[in-house]
Image (cartoon, rainbow, N blue to C red):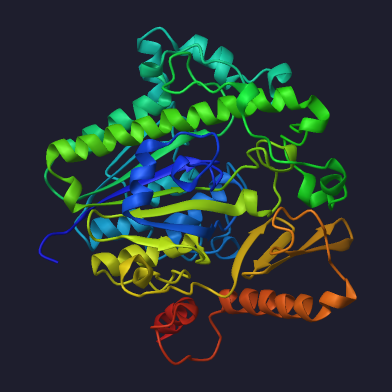
């Protein structure tokens, strides 16, 4: 590689993995991201380490599972444990990259250790007022913004948190985030790592009146739903501030209005992605830039008559969009490709020719980007939240959780029941599969804990052994 490629890492918050016109969604219009899908490698089955924001984001930056880095909730004050190099710091120190982050970081105090040269926030600044707020105040718009969008009055929350932003599109945090990213890209010809992290389409679902696409609620496609299946779920699967955001509670018309706002924000973000791509083309940097598009987690987006998320581990919530684009270098259709968001870190290291730190638990899928005719992916992927763990194969998913003193279980046949309506836990005819998944879950948890007194393993080359061997190297 004669020249280090730039890296543009675009993250969105709470974007359902099916919501792209390039993936044949019936309603959403995303022409600019479709360009990345068409010309890159689009992984259709990538799973987040956690179904909520901050734990998932820390996993991206560390390449570690939640029980390893220890950040299990949003607004967690502590820093991750057992981390050699956060991804931006590694790229800065070993790769010589200038690093910047713009938008919603939501890393908590870990942000100070992450290795960014330049940071500007639209929200969740652990060290002071977000720079976006300062910018809005200078334009006389902050009070209006905070009073409508950030306050989220209770009556709005209970109607899928939809409405119209008091701001014009040019003043939204989407445009502001893209502007800062473009400025960072253009400030130097040195190779860059830019984390462009949009705050939405997470609620509130309030696109501006002059958003690029206006969606008619009456014309949206609503998947079929039956409330009795979801209401029978274990309590841990029904928790969350958005638990009332259901068509059978508020009415289908309200769901349609909420989805129209959700989709409107997606198209606004898509427009900004297009602006950044255009800036890369204008500067002559597009050919030398790797673009990764993903989300910290998903959203029900109308599945089972719901919008938003809860703290469950249903596919709609833990499956993340995941696209790699490098012009004329990455070009693969990935029909089925189980992988995990923690795999981004080691994959990028391999693409850039950097050594993956021993603390990283993900596995590189570099070969999937263009090197092999068929990429099998992982046999099992894992996601976890407080009080529950999930293992997913290509055909089945098992979640073990707890409701107070007793444990709960969910088992789904994802081929026959992709929306996870029919819980088959403890059904005799699936006993073998249930035991197999439970064994994989226990083995995963033991393997990724790997205490420092564990016996010497054979090789650092295996992702399953890196984590254990870092301790052995320290002891030596």
Q: Nearer the viewer, residue 159 or 453?
A: 159
> How far across and how far down the image is residue 455, in percent?
53, 91
The answer to whether 199 is drawn above or below residue 237 in the figure is above
What's the residue at 35%, 25% (across, down)? Answer: 176
Task: Tell me: 141 left or right of 392.
Answer: left
Displayed quadrant of residue 359: bottom left
Could you tell me which quadrant the C terminus lies in? bottom left
User: At x 41% / y 89%, what residue is drawn?
Assistant: 459
Tell whether 435 sits left or right of 376: right
* Figure check: 384 above or below 185: below
Residue 29 at least partly seen: yes
Against 250, residue 118 (above or below) is below
Point out the residue furthest to the top here: 140
Residue 158 in sight from this viewpoint = no
- State which quarter of the image contains the N terminus: bottom left
Which percent across, then down, holds residue 98?
22, 48
Compared to residue 44, the image places residue 302 above or below, namely above
Relative image position of residue 45 (x, y in whole percent): 53, 60
* Residue for point 40% across, 12% down: 137
Looking at the rendered structure, the number of numbered marks drawn on it comes to 0
Image spot of residue 297 (x, y percent): 56, 48
Which residue is depicted at the point 78% across and 75% down? 434
Q: Quadrant of residue 387?
A: bottom right
């Amino acid at each position: 590689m004669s020249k280090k490629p730039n890296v543009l890492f675009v993250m969105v918050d709470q974007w359902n993995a099916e919501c792209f016109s390039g993936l044949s969604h019936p309603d959403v219009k995303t022409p600019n991201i479709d360009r990345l899908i068409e010309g890159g490698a689009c992984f259709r089955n990538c799973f987040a380490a956690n179904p909520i924001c901050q734990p998932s984001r820390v996993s991206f930056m560390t390449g570690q599972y939640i029980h390893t880095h220890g950040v299990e909730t949003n607004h967690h004050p502590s820093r991750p444990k057992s981390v050699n190099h956060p991804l931006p710091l590694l790229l800065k120190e070993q790769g010589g990259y200038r690093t910047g982050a713009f938008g919603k970081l939501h890393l908590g105090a870990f942000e100070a250790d992450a290795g960014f040269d330049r940071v500007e926030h639209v929200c969740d600044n652990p060290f002071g007022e977000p720079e976006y707020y300062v910018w809005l105040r200078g334009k006389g718009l902050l009070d209006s913004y905070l009073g409508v969008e950030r306050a989220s009055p209770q009556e709005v929350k209970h109607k899928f948190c939809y409405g119209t932003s008091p701001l014009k599109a040019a003043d939204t945090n989407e445009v502001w985030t893209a502007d800062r990213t473009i400025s960072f890209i253009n400030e130097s010809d040195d190779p860059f790592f830019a984390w462009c992290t949009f705050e939405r389409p997470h609620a509130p679902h309030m696109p501006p009146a002059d958003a690029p696409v206006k969606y008619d609620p009456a014309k949206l496609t609503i998947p079929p739903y039956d409330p009795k299946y979801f209401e029978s779920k274990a309590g841990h699967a029904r928790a969350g501030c958005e638990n009332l955001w259901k068509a059978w509670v508020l009415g289908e018309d309200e769901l349609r209005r909420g989805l129209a706002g959700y989709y409107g924000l997606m198209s606004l973000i898509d427009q900004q992605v297009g602006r950044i791509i255009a800036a890369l083309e204008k500067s002559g940097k597009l050919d030398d830039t790797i673009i990764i598009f993903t989300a910290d987690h998903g959203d029900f987006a109308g599945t089972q008559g719901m919008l938003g998320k809860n703290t469950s581990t249903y596919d709609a919530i833990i499956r993340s969009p995941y696209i790699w684009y490098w012009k004329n270098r990455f070009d693969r259709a990935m029909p089925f490709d189980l992988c995990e968001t923690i795999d981004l870190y080691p994959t990028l290291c391999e693409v850039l020719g950097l050594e993956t730190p021993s603390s990283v638990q993900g596995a590189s899928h570099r070969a999937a980007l263009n090197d092999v005719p068929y990429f099998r992916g992982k046999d099992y992927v894992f996601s976890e939240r407080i009080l529950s763990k999930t293992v997913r194969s290509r055909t089945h998913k098992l979640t073990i959780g707890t409701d107070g003193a007793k444990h709960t279980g969910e088992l789904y046949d994802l081929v026959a029941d992709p929306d996870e309506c029919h819980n088959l836990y403890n059904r005799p005819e699936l006993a073998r599969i249930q035991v197999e998944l439970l064994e994989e879950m226990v083995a995963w948890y033991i393997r990724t804990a790997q205490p420092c007194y564990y016996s010497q393993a054979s090789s650092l080359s295996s992702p399953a052994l890196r984590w254990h061997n870092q301790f052995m190297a320290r002891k030596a």
